[in-house]
Amino acid sequence: MARKSRTPDFAQILDTLRAHGFSVTPFTGVQGGILVSKHGAGAVLVPGKDAAVAFWERPGAIVGGQIARLLDRGYQKFLKTPKYELPATAAQLQAIHVFGEELTQLTGGISLYNESLGTTSDLYEYDRLKGREAAEPSPARPWELAEGH
């Protein structure tokens, strides 16, 4: 006789999150979306196709009632919303990291090594590289064949 897998469904995962102190509220921007928050960080979850839960909006700090994306500019991390762009503090980065790790564990997600080391950014925009790609074409490489050969 085959054993049935005990994979929790979306409602059971939400109950587990509530039991662990997460604030679980409906999210109006997405049909079936649920805003999950704790420690000043949040994420939007939706029922998944392959798994019980999927991210609509990845974990980020809550700024002005919205989930801010983490932007890395090389020298500083910033929290970016459609209205605001603020420098991220160490406390906010730690809150995002703790929230993301706990959420991944409770939802049955995969914990990746690089994400467990610290907070990973959503966007990387280094100031020295910004606009450089359009400034001048790359020089010809002698080992590559030119046209007509």
Image (spheres, rainbow, N blue to C red):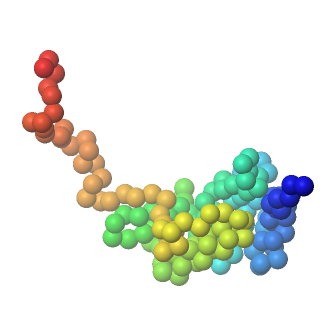
At x 83%, y 62%, the residue is 6
Between 102 and 81, the one nearer to me in the picture: 102
Could you tell me residue 16's position as x and y percent? 81, 71
Can the viewer see residue 132 in this picture?
yes
Q: Is residue 81 left or right of residue 149?
A: right
The extreme right residue here reads: 1
Q: Is residue 99 left or right of residue 106?
A: left
At x 69%, y 55%, the residue is 54
Q: Is residue 89 left or right of residue 147?
A: right
Can the viewer see residue 33 in this picture?
no
Between 126 and 51, the one nearer to me in the picture: 51
At x 74%, y 47%, the residue is 49
At x 73%, y 53%, the residue is 51
137 over 63 or under it: above or below? above
The extreme left residue here reads: 142
Looking at the rendered image, the quarter that the C terminus falls into is top left
